[in-house]
Image (cartoon, rainbow, N blue to C red):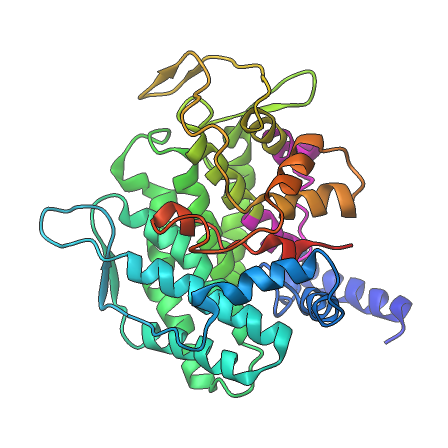
Amino acid sequence: MNPLLKNITRLAGLMIAITLGMSPTQAETFVHPGALHTQTDFDRMKTKVEHGAQPWIDGWNVLTSNPRASLSWTPRPANVVYRGKDGTHAENYAVLFNDAAAAYALALRWKISGDDAYADKAVAVLNAWSGTLTGIGGNSDKFLASGIYGYQFANAAEIMRTYKKWPEHDFQRFTTMMLEVFYPMNHDFLVRHNGAKIDHYWANWDLANMDSMIAIGILADRRDIYNEAVDYFKHGNGNGAINHVVWKIYPDGLGQTQESGRDQGHNTLNVSLLGAFCQMAWNQHDDLFGYDDNRVLNGVEYIARYNLGADVPYTRYVNSDVTQDVIADAGRGDARPVWELFYNHYVVLKGLSAPYTSAFAEKLRPEGGGGNYGPNSGGFDQLGYGTLTYTLK
């Protein structure tokens, strides 16, 4: 379609929607695939890898060397996943974060190589879980599982929805699992916060469940769920709302973040979860990276600068539970594969200055994925492979 005619048609549709009482966002259909990656992204990755171009080929080699991207991977689905000691059940959530990482890695390998064997294996992982999982339990940590692994699984399925040999009924069964097991927990946590005071839970708890919510909204074509997540980012009462995550802006543009006085492992986790959220919204034409004068970037640069060893300003942080007079040095320098996304968006795409984010991206390049940063849950909090997936040029 002629671009001018396409825009006229789009505007006409928006006017009709507004007349019917719908918001402009509700009037638009979702981009598919369109969570962390679009088809344009996959086309770029495939072309660059086929030509052996750097740094994509280094990122590809990290992916193909990870055992979770192997055809020998065997899923281990559980009927109920437990995270956090509840006094009764043994924790078994490692099977979920390993299989979520595998489903995503296999999906990437298929989209880039074109080898259907990897698609079949990715689908086998997704089908195994959708045919088995009925609930997530444990102590309050169960809400971390519903958030982190929810968004990761939804992203793997969003990639695989383009695979013609994944039967529609199997895709719908997986989507139903996401809507009936993960989303209700995401929603409940953001509304009730496990019965705690609104500022009790650290920002990463909200952000994890926001990530899952927005990803499920895209996967299930549920504009109401998608809008719920975006609205929370902008106006939520908990610590995951952007003005609570990045709660103080200094004159030099750095933004102090909510977990800065806690430890840097969780502070950098916020970078990971913020990046995933903004990227998924961006691929649906909502620019949350730029929201409130690039408030996300203010916080990411603050975290990057401090974790690269430089000083940052700090203001005493106080909430209902804690008073933190100094910035935490525990975990300082924590390495998470989360920086390429921000570097490529702000610096390469938008031409903005982000010197500390740029330096961190360069330091960790090429970024790996689940299992490349340790065997425990922290090494699987992010899907990773950002050098391969987010490098633009």
Q: Residue at x 64, y 29 (%)?
A: 298
Region rendered in magenta? 276-299
Q: Residue at x 28, y 34 (%)?
A: 196
Residue 349 visible at all: yes
Horizontal arrangement in the rendering, residue 8 relative to residue 23 (left or right): right
Res 151 → quadrant: bottom left
- Residue 150 included in the magenta stretch of the image: no
Horizontal arrangement in the rendering, residue 17 relative to residue 323 (left or right): right
User: In which quadrant of the rendered image does the N terminus lie?
Assistant: bottom right
Horizontal arrangement in the rendering, residue 148 relative to residue 112 (left or right): left
Q: Position of residue 78 (x, y in %)?
A: 24, 68
Q: Give the camera-side residue of 387 and 350.
A: 387
Residue 157 visible at all: no
Q: Residue at x 42, y 11 (%)?
A: 325
Residue found at the far left of this picture: 88
Horizontal arrangement in the rendering, residue 200 relative to residue 79 (left or right): right
Q: Overall secondary structure of the magenta stretch?
A: helix
Q: Position of residue 213 (x, y in %)?
A: 46, 55
Res 177 → quadrant: bottom left
Residue 195 drawn above or below residue 303: below
Q: Position of residue 96 (x, y in %)?
A: 33, 61
- Residue 298 included in the magenta stretch of the image: yes
Q: Give the camera-side residue of 61 and 330.
A: 61
Res 81 → quadrant: bottom left
Q: Position of residue 174 (x, y in %)?
A: 40, 74
